[in-house]
Image (cartoon, rainbow, N blue to C red):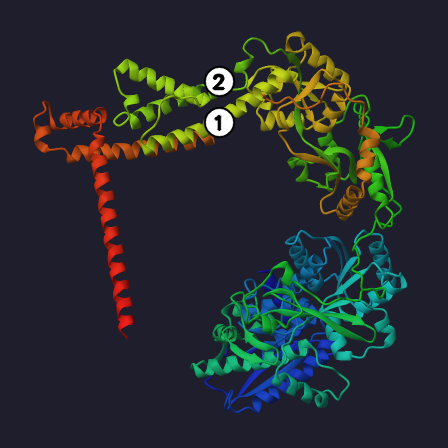
Amino acid sequence: MSTLGFLLCFFIFLGLNSSGYSQNVTSRPSVVSIGAIFTFNSTIGRVAKIAIEEAVKDVNSNSSILPGTKLNITMQDSNCSGFLGMAEALQFMETDIVAIIGPQCSTVAHIICHVANELQTPLLSFGATDPTLSSIQFPYFVRTTQSDSYQMAAVAEIVDHYGWTAVIAIFVDDDYGRNGIAALSDKLAERRCKISYKAAIPPGSGVNQNVIMDLLVKVALMESRIIVLHASGDIGFRVFSAANYLQMMDNGYVWIATDWLAYILDSNSPLPSDTMDKMQGVLVLRQHIPDSERKRAFLSRWRNLAGGHLGMNSYGLYAYDSVWLLAHALDAFFNQGGIISFSNDSRFLSSEASNLHLDAMSVFDDGPQLLNYILQSNTVGLTGPLKFSPDKSLINPAYDIINVIGSGIRQVGYWSNYTGLSTVLPETLYTKPPNRSSASQQLYSVIWPGDTLTKPRGWVFPNNGQRLKIGVPNRASYREFVSRVKGTDMFQGFCIDVFTAAVNLLPYAVPYQFIPFGDGTKNPSYTELVNSITTGVLDAAVGDIAIVTNRTKIVDFTQPYAASGLVVVAPFKKSNTGAWAFLRPFTRSMWTVTAFSFIVIGIVVWILEHRINDEFRGPPNRQIITVLSFSLSTMFFAHRENTVSTLGRLVLIIWLFVVLIINSSYTASLTSILTVQQLSSPIKGIDSLRTGNDPIGYQEGSFAERYLTEELNISKSRLVSLGTPEEYALALKNGPGKGGVAAVVDERPYIELFLSTQCTFKIVGQEFTKSGWGFAFPRDSPLAIDLSTAILQLAENGDLQRIHDKWLVKSSCSLDNAEIESDRLQLKSFWGLFLICGIACFIALLIYFLQIMNLVRSAPTESIATEPGGVRSRTLQRFLSIMDEKEDLSKSKNKRLNSERTFENDRDEELGSKKRRHTDLATGSNSS
């Protein structure tokens, strides 16, 4: 309704004359009227006017398209004014226009798209690049050029390619500028980059130069040095002039201009030298137009058409192709029986609107059909393929990336929506599979502002007189890491020295000041310290800050400069060997499995040897003693019984290998227990702490409290906060029975410093988390990246170790500070050996039982049938009987002897035949 009201106001302005309801219908008319709306007195408009007129002439002179029909075009100058554009569009609707070429400006397009929707008249815009001109909201708007969403995707990929993370956007504050920069923001966000500052310039050529100057002064005070300029020609050159005056075109800056600069360079080249001097090193995007014979031929004609004083640009080529695109669509429309007919909308004939003379408005009845033919076009123009994707955008969007150098420009690469950045022509890449790998994203070297080939860092510290506010924990304990110098705002310690050494390695100055965090009477909360960065209270945090998951979600950390992780420290006592020390090398489970294995091996060997070995036969009590004595004697390799069967020998060999390993390990462990001082603690590690109910100490302010409660599910009531090393020692000495703790959980660097002077406590178990200490900065801070590189340099040149030795090397206790580990051999260390032995026993028994079953099946049926009981019972009895009976070895020996005699006879016979053949050959040779 608001759109209709706006239209009604404009009809009053136009003073349309009243006319009765009418409708004209034509089949294939001799003349088809089309309109064009653009800005005549602009760089794009001057080129487009000539190109559109020439395209109409070419269409009318070509008999293969629209035979018998001529195009009649009427052009209107909108001067990029929405008011004039609306008025001219309404005037077109009085003259039965079937389509409009244009508009050129996005501001005008937003307004007259409403008219096109109501009157079903297609708009073919060769210059409105605003991404928000959606085909869904404005179905009759057909963009015959590329949307700025693709251009901003190219800018974002360039920014990401060079490793920059933040840009400053300078733009004209209209639909074209605002919406283009909004698209840039979205594309940058996809690559974890951002627009750090938006500088809007009022639209219109009457902008005061002081406004631009003040705006650039604000930009110069910002951190980012990557500037994207999305403007029009007049304002863009004035920005460059002011930037050059403020020395913002010098070394360290990066300027990326959208295609507004490209079409000016193409149409007005060469520009005056003083203008070019103010743009040296600028990167420019230009819509990529594939080379072709038709394009070269038209450019040759263009020199005569333009009189040699106006160069062709990409928008002029798109304007030319827009006319041809419409001509092909009209030709298809007429070939399919389409009829051009117009009618008045009944809404415009209502009594309320009759005094406004709306009956002159004509609705194109077959506008939807013509629109479909336009969108279904598949032809080739001067700009390449004229084909639309499902979202009504031209296919294969691509841009040239050019560098302003001296008095001209230099091509440094291409961007296409198909493969991204490349030094290869996009049309060549279209024939290959898409490749978006980082290795394929390439550009030629760029000469940046300041006439340098070195890639600018892309950011500096804001030149606003303010220093970085760096929060430092004001600790009450372990002051060797970080501590405040009394009476001053200065800090010292291991962490501070690492930070200052890293900052000194940076190739630029970093103005900063340390801000104490905490009152110094107790350790502050490090989580709150990190949160102060996200709220903007602090610019960074330096200290013994652990890099843990929940903190990395809100800030960026540098490369860790110290290894860390949670460990358990507990009191210990010296343990005596005692009378039962020989049992200590193995755990209870290890002793149980070993004893069971000896018995199993004895039984398996007895089964395999019982039928054929007299040493494993006899009365039951004798056989039981034989099994036990054989299995236990293998422990010392002193078994008297010989194994006869192949399977028995195989099992025994594998078992003896297992026994050898077990004996060696037992001997080594027992030797260590009896000769080396042993330390013991009831706490074996974090697992024993979790399963118990004893209180656990942790350092005040540490992340250990959160980890123990949230990750390990330890009740908070069991946790005791401790502030100083002295409190650690007292709580551990008292123990749970006297109001102390069973163990303390803290980070390794603190514990190592604590144990350097406390000799009655030890680390038990393994370190159960892996992390490190780093310096915290806001997300995507470039300083975090540079400091990470500096920390790596400190580690490589040895300075990091020297700083560590300066602050943290203390006198050590006389006893060894090694961690208390379990000195008993675990079953898990030998399960592989037991598994191999078990598999060997299983295979041997399986083969043996298969042999027995074969004997059962081969037994005479009569002998089984005579036995009492059922069939299964008789078969089982026969199976056990065969297992128990002694095998007659004489038969097998006779078979073996017979086979040997047969083999010898065959061999003698073969030798005899060879000897006879040799004799016959000798006789034959003598006779000859």
Residue 686: name its quadrant: top right
Decide if residue 210 is on the left or right side of residue 338: right
Helix, strand or loop at label 1? It is helix
Residue 217: name its quadrant: bottom right
Are the two marked residues, 2 and 1, in contact with CB atoms closer than 8 angstroms?
no
Decide if residue 294 is on the left or right side of residue 305: left
**Nearest to the observer: residue 280 or residue 661:** 661
Q: Amino acid at mark 1?
A: Leu
* Residue 767 placement (x, y as % from top left): 64, 28
Residue at 82% in and 42% down: 502
Residue farthest to the right, as pictured: 487
* Residue 244 placement (x, y as % from top left): 87, 65
Residue at 25% in and 47% down: 904
* Residue 404 placement (x, y as % from top left): 79, 71
Crowd band around label 1 with a 10 angstrom C-alpha radius: few (<14), some (14–19), many (20+): some
Residue at 67% in and 39% down: 552
- Is residue 926 positioned above or below 686 on the image? below
Q: Is residue 205 visible?
A: no
Crowd band around label 2 with a 10 angstrom C-alpha radius: few (<14), some (14–19), many (20+): some
Numbered badge on residue 635: none
**Nearest to the observer: residue 522 or residue 820:** 820
Q: Amino acid at mark 2?
A: Arg
* Residue 410 placement (x, y as % from top left): 75, 73
Q: Quadrant of the C terminus?
A: bottom left
- Is residue 803 positioned above or below 308 on the image? above
Residue identifier under label 1: 660
Residues at marks 2 and 1, CA–CA distance in whole angstroms:
20 Å
- Is residue 646 positioned above or below 677 on the image? below
Helix, strand or loop at label 2? It is helix
Q: Is residue 138 visible?
A: yes
Residue identifier under label 2: 588
